């Protein structure tokens, strides 16, 4: 019976994305944070109000809620902190809706606190239309979305130069979902490149970025087959590790295109000035670019979601600056071009993911 395509749900998701962008636009025009708080409230209410059954409300969401209900008797067979987080809430309540509330409060807090910290007032809100993509995907990938939110909070601490807490949060994320381990090395990446020498020239930038990509792909290709032969992974991880063995780069186009586009726009932008104004955000986006090929080879497609909000924030800055390359009379046309582009991309991604992730229809849970 489920899932099936539902026009109302499709339009609802798109309207929610536009709504998030409007909240961010209002935030950039105001002095306070009330609009981001309102967006967070809407985010949480929307997530907890959906019905969750088998193949409804997110493909894996039903399994998470079954694990929650049984966690008082048996600790979920998942990463340690997530398992104890689940049991702690189960000791308080037996309501899956309340459990969902705490989970999505964490996810939403990571998203919007990151935006509050990194999104400057002089930026475009257009890219945040696509914030609906990781949001609805979290209906399916709740555990990795929670890990991503914790990583984002760690980046907030890093921005504030609270290095101890940044490290604690990044390590804690690994114990919510092991895929977060790919982002712990970002702390080392930050220490190496935070002085800005990566961005001294475009030639240096290209040489270093492609060198890191080459080395990471080479290392992955060396160890990948040995890991499989040794049987070091369980059946689920082995499936993800082997699923892209014979895949072409075209099969990764939906993940590759955004990475290539943002890399290209950064490259043609005010390169040094952009880094000087937003150093940590720039390094996050560059790190996202360099780990993409290796993560694709490892079948870790969810890696795309971890710095998704960071990429949207960089787009917000790039679009705002890019508009000023044109005459005042042309800027409105440029704005509409970007608006149309992000709406089309959001429509495309919703259409691409809804069936596999069981995201339609969205039905209210009258609890």
Image: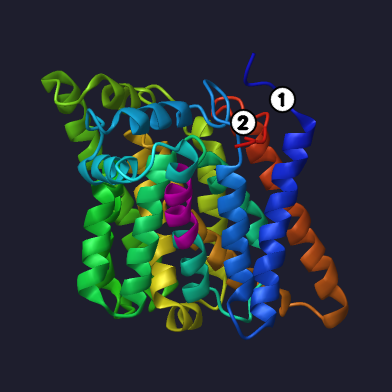
Q: Where 67 sits versus 128, above or below?
A: above
Q: Residue furthest bottom?
A: 31
Residue at image coords 46%, 61%: 109
Residue 108: where, in percent of width, then height?
50, 57
Task: Tell me, yes or no, whether the highlighted magenta stretch contains residue 106.
Answer: yes
Q: CA distance from mark 2 to mark 1?
A: 8 Å
Task: Tell me, yes or no, whether the highlighted magenta stretch contains residue 315.
Answer: no
Q: Quadrant of residue 206?
A: bottom left
Q: Can you say which quadrant of the picture contains the C terminus?
A: top right
Residue 310: where, in percent of width, then height?
48, 62
Residue 66: where, in percent of width, then height?
39, 26
Q: How many marks?
A: 2
Q: Quadrant of residue 20?
A: bottom right
- For the record, the magenta segment spans 100-109
Asked if the residue at tag 1 contacts the one at tag 2, i.e. Cβ–Cβ closer than 8 Å, the answer is yes
Q: Can you say which quadrant of the picture contains the N terminus?
A: top right
Which colour assignment does the render follow?
Answer: rainbow
Q: Where 4 sits versus 318, above or below?
A: above
- Disc marking residue 354: 2
Question: Considering only order in the chain, which callout, 1 or 2, is on the residue closer to the N terminus?
Answer: 1
Q: Where 138 sits versus 118, above or below?
A: above
Query: According to the image, label 1 marks what residue?
Result: 5
What secondary structure is marked by label 2? Answer: loop
Q: Quadrant of residue 32?
A: bottom right
Residue 125 appears in the figure:
no
Q: Where 297 sits versus 303, above or below?
A: above
Q: Nearer the viewer, residue 230 or 306?
A: 306
Q: Nearer the viewer, residue 217 or 80?
A: 80
């Amino acid at each position: 019976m489920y899932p099936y395509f539902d026009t109302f749900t499709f339009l609802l998701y798109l309207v929610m994305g536009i709504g998030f962008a409007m909240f961010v636009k209002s935030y950039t025009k105001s002095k306070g944070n009330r609009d981001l708080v309102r967006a967070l409230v809407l985010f949480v209410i929307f997530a907890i109000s959906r019905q969750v059954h088998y193949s409804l409300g997110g493909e894996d969401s039903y399994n998470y809620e079954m694990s929650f209900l049984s966690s008082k008797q048996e600790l979920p067979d998942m990463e340690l902190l997530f398992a104890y987080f689940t049991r702690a809430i189960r000791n308080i309540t037996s309501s899956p809706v309340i459990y969902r509330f705490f989970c999505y409060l964490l996810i939403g807090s990571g998203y919007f606190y990151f935006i509050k910290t990194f999104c400057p007032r002089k930026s475009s809100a257009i890219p945040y239309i696509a914030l609906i993509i990781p949001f609805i995907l979290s209906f399916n990938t709740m555990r990795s979305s929670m890990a991503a939110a914790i990583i984002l909070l760690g980046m907030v601490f890093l921005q504030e130069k609270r290095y101890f807490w940044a490290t604690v949060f990044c390590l804690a994320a690994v114990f919510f979902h092991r895929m977060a381990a790919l982002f712990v090395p970002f702390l080392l990446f930050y220490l190496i490149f935070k002085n800005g020498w990566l961005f001294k020239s475009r030639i240096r930038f290209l040489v270093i970025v492609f060198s890191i990509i080459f080395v990471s792909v080479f290392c992955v290709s060396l160890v990948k087959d040995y890991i499989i032969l040794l049987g070091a992974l369980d059946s689920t991880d082995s499936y993800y590790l082997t699923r892209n063995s014979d895949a072409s780069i075209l099969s990764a186009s939906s993940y590759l295109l955004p990475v290539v586009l943002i890399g290209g726009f950064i490259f043609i932008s005010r390169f040094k000035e952009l880094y000087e104004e937003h150093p940590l955000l720039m390094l996050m986006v560059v790190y996202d670019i360099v780990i993409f090929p290796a993560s694709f080879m490892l079948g870790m497609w969810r890696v795309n979601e971890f710095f998704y909000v960071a990429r949207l924030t960089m787009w917000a800055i790039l679009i705002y600056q890019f508009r000023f390359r044109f005459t005042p009379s042309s800027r409105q046309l440029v704005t509409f071009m970007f608006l149309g582009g992000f709406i089309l991309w959001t429509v495309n991604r919703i259409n691409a993911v809804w069936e596999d992730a069981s995201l339609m229809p969205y039905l209210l849970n009258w609890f």
